[in-house]
Image (cartoon, rainbow, N blue to C red):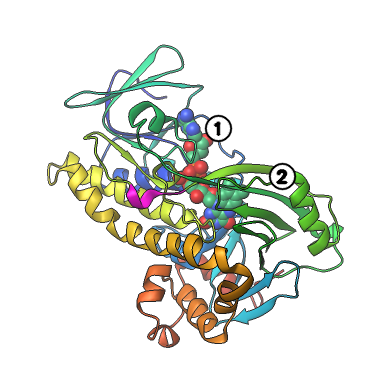
């Protein structure tokens, strides 16, 4: 039972990877923490469930239980042309079903001592000099010293607290095709240019392939019919189960913490990167930073905004690099130099080795000449997959 009379150290809105990591690190530091979410878990979250090695490396506990497959092989195609296949030692990413991944992460956090409250509605957020007061479900008030908004790309907290913060958004649609419907099991594949300023993807999991289409350009509209066409051409079937879509929150490279009591993390702060639409890594990273910044503030060590802004520097740097890659270099030239560069053997070797050793795009580009000598890393979550002779289904 959650007591509404007490004042929490921290309220986190949203139980996705950003919110859960914020809550986990704050509770580990001894804070009294409440997560509120409008859904009970497990809940649906439109996502490909591709979790990069660099994201797994940030997790403070193993999630091997919910990892279904992992791969060091990447297939990259232009439109519907035959893809180029690239392989590296180690794993560049793993695949999970988001419903299971998020529920597992939340359960671990609850076990660590965080309280969870399912709410119907978030009505208002009011900051005072020494607290933040949250009104929910048409009357209940809950107080905390700090709040972390991790309520995703459509963040309501952002609309309530920082309505002038402007971010851009992308969009993606995904669904699943059971292997029983297919004649072969596909490999991980990106097909650039199948969608303007984006791609189609196939992510193989334990018993199905997750198939999706993505654009980082908010002027491009993508429809279920486009996803069915992609699936028909790549998989030979347009029968896709559970098709869902959702926006992705971009533009976090301009985000600065300005309010004293409310911090934004994950997609709510625009920390998804636009090149691949990868958001889990920065959700975990920014959630971790936000939870640690609140813990330091509660213990009186540092001013919260100052500390959080400092920590966010590396996320901003990476986003600037990804923005440039997506909007200036790659997608505008996808039919020419963009795709040629991505599929040149040297850049692929560098890119894959960088990914398998847990590097961000910024780190890969800055250490371009060192990447060929990087060794793959094996975060603890890979343990079970490593014990198996083969990791792809
Ligand atoms: C179709 C699709 C495919 C994607 N594929 C990938 C991928 O393969 N790999 C990858 O890295 N990224 C992917 N992304 C991006 C990734 O899903 C997000 O970047 C990531 O989930 C952001 O995490 P978050 O914790 O910030 O927000 P979310 O995961 O969106 O979690 C937000 C939480 O807040 C809750 N919430 C929302 N509003 C309220 C409210 N008013 N009150 C209370 N609770 C609220 C929601 O219920 C939810 O639990 C994909 C996105 C889409 C749309």
Disc 2 is placed on an element classified as loop
Residue 148 % position (x, y): 34, 38
The stretch drawn in magenta includes residue 66 = no
Crowd band around label 1 with a 10 angstrom C-alpha radius: few (<14), some (14–19), many (20+): some
For the point 70% across and 56% down, the residue is 210
Residue 355 % position (x, y): 48, 73
For the view shown, which residue lies furthest in the top direction?
139
Please name whichever residue, 300 or 363, is drawn nearer the observer in this view of the structure. Answer: 363
Disc on res. 177: none
Disc 1 is placed on an element classified as loop
Q: Which residues are magenta?
A: 250-254
Crowd band around label 2 with a 10 angstrom C-alpha radius: few (<14), some (14–19), many (20+): few
- To which residue does mark 2 refer? 223
- To which residue does mark 1 refer? 40
In the rendered view, does 134 fall on the left or right side of 185? left
| Residue 66 visible | no
On screen, 314 above or below 86? Answer: above
Instruction: Quarter of the image for the N terminus: give it.
Output: top left
On screen, 353 above or below 263? Answer: below
In the rendered view, does 391 fall on the left or right side of 140? right
Closer mark to the observer between disc 2 and disc 1? 2
Please name whichever residue, 97 or 263, is drawn nearer the observer in this view of the structure. Answer: 263
Please name whichever residue, 3 or 58, is drawn nearer the observer in this view of the structure. Answer: 58
In the rendered view, does 187 fall on the left or right side of 58? right
């Amino acid at each position: 039972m959650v007591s509404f009379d007490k004042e929490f150290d921290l309220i986190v809105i949203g139980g996705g990877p950003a919110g859960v990591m914020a809550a986990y690190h704050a509770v580990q530091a001894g804070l009294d923490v409440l997560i509120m979410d409008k859904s009970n878990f497990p809940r649906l979250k439109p996502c490909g469930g591709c979790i990069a090695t660099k994201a797994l490396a940030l997790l403070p506990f193993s999630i091997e239980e919910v990892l279904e497959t992992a791969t060091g092989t990447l297939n990259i195609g232009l439109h519907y042309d035959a893809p180029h296949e690239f392989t590296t030692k180690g794993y560049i990413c793993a695949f999970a079903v988001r419903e299971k991944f998020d529920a597992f992460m939340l359960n671990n956090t609850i076990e660590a001592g965080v309280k969870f409250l399912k709410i119907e509605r978030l009505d208002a957020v009011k900051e005072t000099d020494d607290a933040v007061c949250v009104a929910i479900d048409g009357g209940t008030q809950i107080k905390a010293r700090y709040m972390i908004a991790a309520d995703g790309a459509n963040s309501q907290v952002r609309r309530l607290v920082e309505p002038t913060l402007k971010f851009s958004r992308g969009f993606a649609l995904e669904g699943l095709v059971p292997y029983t419907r297919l004649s072969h099991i596909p490999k991980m594949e990106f097909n650039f240019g199948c969608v303007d300023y984006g791609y189609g993807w196939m992510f193989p999991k334990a018993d199905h392939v997750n198939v999706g289409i993505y654009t980082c350009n908010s002027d491009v509209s993508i429809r279920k019919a486009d996803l069915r066409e992609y699936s028909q051409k790549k998989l030979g079937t347009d029968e896709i189960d559970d098709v869902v879509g959702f926006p992705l929150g971009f533009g976090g490279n301009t985000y600065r913490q300005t309010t004293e009591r409310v911090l934004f993390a994950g997609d709510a702060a625009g920390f998804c990167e636009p090149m691949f639409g990868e958001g889990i890594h920065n959700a975990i990273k920014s959630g971790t930073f936000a939870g640690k910044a609140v813990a330091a503030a509660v213990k009186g060590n540092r001013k919260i905004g100052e500390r959080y802004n400092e920590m966010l520097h590396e996320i901003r740097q990476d986003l600037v690099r990804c923005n440039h890659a997506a909007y200036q270099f790659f997608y505008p030239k996808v039919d020419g130099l963009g795709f040629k560069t991505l599929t040149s053997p040297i850049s692929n070797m560098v890119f894959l080795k960088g990914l398998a050793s847990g590097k961000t795009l910024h780190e890969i580009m800055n250490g371009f000449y060192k990447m060929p000598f990087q060794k793959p890393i094996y975060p603890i979550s890979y343990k079970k997959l490593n014990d198996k002779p083969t990791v792809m289904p």
